[in-house]
Image: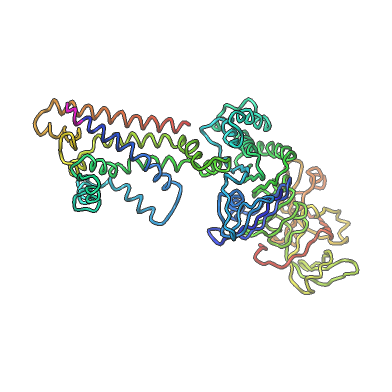
Amino acid sequence: MDWQALFLTLKLAGATALLLVPFAIWLARHLAWSQWRGQGALEAAIMLPLVLPPTVLGYYLLLGLGGASPLGQVYHALTGRPLVFAFDGLLFASLIFNLPFAVQPMQRAFASIPREVREAAWVSGLSRWQAFLRIELPLAWPGVAAALALTFAHTLGEFGVVLMVGGNLPGETKTIAIAIYDQVQAFNDSAAAGMSALLLALSFLAVMFVYRLGRSGGRS
Amino acid sequence: MRLEARIEQLAPIPLAADIVCERGELLALVGPSGSGKSTILRCLAGLHRPQGGYVRCGNTIWFDAERDIDVTPQARRVGVVFQHYGLFPHMSALDNVAAALGHLPAAQRAAKAHAWLAHVNLDGLEARRPGELSGGQQQRVAIARALAREPQALLLDEPFSAVDQVTRRKLLRQLIQLRRSLDIPIVLVTHDLEEASLLADRMTVLHHGRTLQSASPTQMLAQPVSALVARLTDQPNLFVGKVLRHLPAIDTSEIEWLGRRFFAPHTPVFPVGETVCWVVPAENVVLVREGDSERENCVAARVAECLVWRGHASVSAQVDGRGDAALSFAIGASLAVRRGIIPGTEIVLQLQKSAIRLLPSDPAVIR
């Protein structure tokens, strides 16, 4: 078992979920409750990581985050470090390729809250913030939890984009999925089997968690 | 305090409506779907911002387009009962009501919420969530929550549309009782004219976002200002005639309809020879004996339809066998049986002169 790769992966998955979900809540509410010109294009763009080959997404992220890109230059000027082939860049890429997994379930959850319920909160005297915390968030909670679980699980297993943007630097960008690939390449089947089984179990648990939430959400 | 509003906008639904509701008064906004009544209610509550106009409650300005004042729904102190109630599904009935008690210290909220639920006869159901309550009970939680804010105005958006007929009658009776204790303006949006007539002190008829007439339900029925209002308030006896002559000495205008002469109250605004619409409320169409057919405003007709329901017979009888000349009236079911009123029966009807009203001609309204 490559413990270093496992911890790096858990760190990446945890950080992605915690950073992405608050932003995705904001975005999902906006998409669920308002209509504006260009919304369809934005929704399509958010869904792109689901259908694009990881190499294509990785290629564009490499271009967008690389040393020659404005973002890469600003980041380098601020921190003295490059974005690509580093954990920070990997995290950034992870935030992008997880967008559909975070936004979709929450958008559906927020859209299922009737407008009357939100408006009833306002006319009952609840501020927008109170209405969000006491009414909207509890009602959308299954969607938020699903977003957390799916983002976490998907980050655990992402391979193509990670390899393109992060490469394979132990302790910096080498995640467990890449470690498995390395072990298979080196004909080290038992190590690959152990790590694969762990990823399988974690992913299964995450997806089961999402389904349980979906069922309990449907009951209430 | 008095709730007073002028709501103007061009899009998405054109609105040009004037609303006045006095303290303690129940005003019904009626009109077909798409007439803008719910949007107007949302404007009053601060949930929709119109392009122009104002909303005032007592001395407080809630909205004024010219002065760019738009008080938030939270700050308006308005109670709203939504069409589907808008209850918070994850909270108990008690918590739903307590959520609207933010103006009280936290320690007092539970007791006050209990009191409000008791006020709408829901004691014992405090712990239930909306999903565990019947439609009628949910509506009462919504009313308790709306009143818990101690609002300066109460707005009801089709509050009876989501319950069955039996529950609806029960809730109507409860609301009639409840409103006696309320000393605030109450605005009710409904498309149900029977509901409006039962509950409202005054009705405002809306069409395409415009207020056509505001009057008491009785006055609205007796004195519609236009053929459109008569049509929208479901007056069945609306026809086209022609002014024959004015007889001011006997307070009469004579009109012609289907080659017959009828007397109406003197209405000199319509010159002799002018085509007019005329309307007579169903309760002023009287079944008379055949021997009385020479009396004033009598006309022979053949029964086309007789629907008996709850002791009443609703009858439609055609003059000259014409479908577009059917007079509607209601009589007791037992009288209908005694007089043998069934489709095909020849009868004589008298149109009470004092109840006939002449209106400007409006070909678009007459079917």
Q: Is there any visible trace of residue A56 in the rendered image?
A: no
Name the residue rendered at 32%, 43% in the picture: A99
Looking at the picture, does residue B2 appear above or below residue B246? Answer: above
Place of residue A30 in the rendered image (x, y in percent of width and height, measured from the top left): 42, 47
Looking at the picture, does residue A217 appear above or below residue B313? Answer: above
Q: Quadrant of residue B219?
A: bottom right
Place of residue B143 in the rendered image (x, y in percent of width and height, measured from the top left): 64, 38
Residue at the left extreme? A186
Magenta span: helix, strand or loop, mainly?
helix
B81 left or right, relative to B319: left
Name the residue rendered at 20%, 35% in the picture: A175
User: On the rendered image, what quadrant is the C terminus of chain B found in?
Assistant: bottom right
B72 left or right, relative to B273: left
Q: Nearer the viewer, residue A118 or B100?
A: B100
Residue B254 colored in magenta in the image: no
Name the residue rendered at 77%, 65% in the picture: B358
How many labels sit on residues?
0
Place of residue B349 in the rendered image (x, y in percent of width and height, measured from the top left): 81, 56
Applied colour scheme: rainbow
A155 left or right, relative to A23: left
Q: Is there any visible trace of residue A219 in the rendered image?
A: yes
Span of residues in magenta: A1-5
Residue at the right extreme? B249
B253 left or right, relative to B64: right
Q: Nearer the viewer, residue A208 or A110?
A: A110
Place of residue B261 in the rendered image (x, y in percent of width and height, measured from the top left): 82, 67
